Each structure stands twice: as C-alpha cells, then as structure tokens.
Amino acid sequence: RQPYVSVMGEDANLQTLAPAEGFTSYIKISLVAGLLASSPWVFYHIWMFVAAGLYPKERKYVYIAVPFSAALFICGAVFFLVIVAPLALGFFLKINNWVNLGSDYWTFMNYIAFVTHLMLVFGIAFQTPIAIFFLNRTGLVSMKALSASRKYVLLVIVIVAAMATPPDVVSQISLAIPLYLLFELGILLSYLGGRKKKS
C-alpha cells in the first residue's frame, strides 16, 4: 500500500527514491524521539555547564530551569507536530492543488526532514522565557531595557521565524506568535522574580 499524508482534505503520496532512504529516515525519527525522551537529562547537563560560570547565589535558578527548560522543549516540539505541521503541510498541498500541479508525490526523507527539523526549531525557540529570565537575573539585561525593546524584539522574531522555517506564511506566523508570547512570559517571570527578591 502506498503511504501518504492527508491534511485539510488533500493527500500527498510518500515515496522513497534511494535504497537506504526509508532506513535513514527511521533512524532520524528514532534520534529525535530519543532526544525528546531524554531531554530532561540533556538539559540538566547543559545547565550544569552554564552553572559553572555563575555565582553561587545564581546557581539555585539552574535547578528550577532544568525541568522548566525540558518541559518547554517538549511543548515546543509537540506544538509544532500537533498544530503547526498540519497547517503548514495543508497550506503546501492547497497551493499545489491551486496551481494545478496534479498529484503530490513527496519523498519520505524530505517529509521526515521537514517535520523533525521544525520540531527541533520549535523546541529550541520555546526556551525563550528561560533565556530572558537568566539574562535579567544575571544583570545583563534590565527590566526597563526588556520593556523598551518590545518593538525591536518583535521585528527580530519575525526575521528569525522567516529564516528558521520554510518559505510559507503559515509556518512563519505559527513560530513568530508563540515566540513573542514566550518573550512576554520571560518578562513576566523576570518581574515576578525581581519582586520576590525585593521582598
């Protein structure tokens, strides 16, 4: 039976063009699934590396960041897989149908590369609140600077989303909106952390 992807009422047939294409694609799936499953352990070691350059009073935040960081990474990957991927793939299928390209035949490797790449992009992008919180806690960026930089951050986010995603509006907007909301979440966490420190 010919494998296919079905989204938004449109179907795309998946096919392999090389002998090892199916095997290498499943290896890539396994690696990404392993990264998601082991993300708490991975982020623990990443943050321990960061902690080596922090003051003792700042290291306590690392133990809070590890589970939060892993959870955000998984949420980002799942958000893309469940919400953004169907929209983006459906957009491509609709466009191909609109310009009368006939049946869609996608290679299995390209399809898996598209999905796994953007899962990682969204997972990493969802680390934004943690990054902002640490920049503020370490004194590199003040609350005043964060609040005043909103319009510039929005511009940078749109540019980053355009560079990190395929050239379609759906993927770009789907990444840009959560990124900006996560930036605001980072400001909120920094504000609450500052109030707690003062009290």
Image (tube, rainbow, N blue to C red):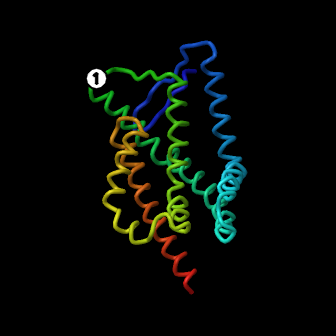
Residue in view at x 39 percent, y 67 percent: 145
Q: Which of the two residues, 16 or 55, is positioned nearer the viewer here? A: 55
Residue in view at x 54 percent, y 24 percent: 108
| Residue that extends furthest to the bottom in the rendered view of this protein | 199
Up the image or down, 13 lies above or below 172; here it is above
As drawn, is 152 to the left or to the right of 123?
Answer: left
Q: Which of the two residues, 140 or 62, is positioned nearer the viewer here? A: 140
Mark 1: which amino acid?
Asn
Residue in view at x 43 percent, y 30 percent: 11
Residue where numbered disc 1 is placed: 100
Residue in view at x 43 percent, y 40 percent: 164
Q: Position of residue 176 (x, y in %)?
A: 39, 51
Up the image or down, 117 lies above or below 59; here it is above
In the rendered image, the quadrant that contains the N terminus is: top right
In the rendered image, the quadrant that contains the C terminus is: bottom right
In the structure shown, which secondary structural element does the residue marked by tag 1 occupy?
loop
Q: Which of the two residues, 193 or 119, is positioned nearer the viewer here? A: 193
Q: Position of residue 68 (x, y in %)?
A: 62, 61
As drawn, is 2 to the left or to the right of 90?
Answer: right
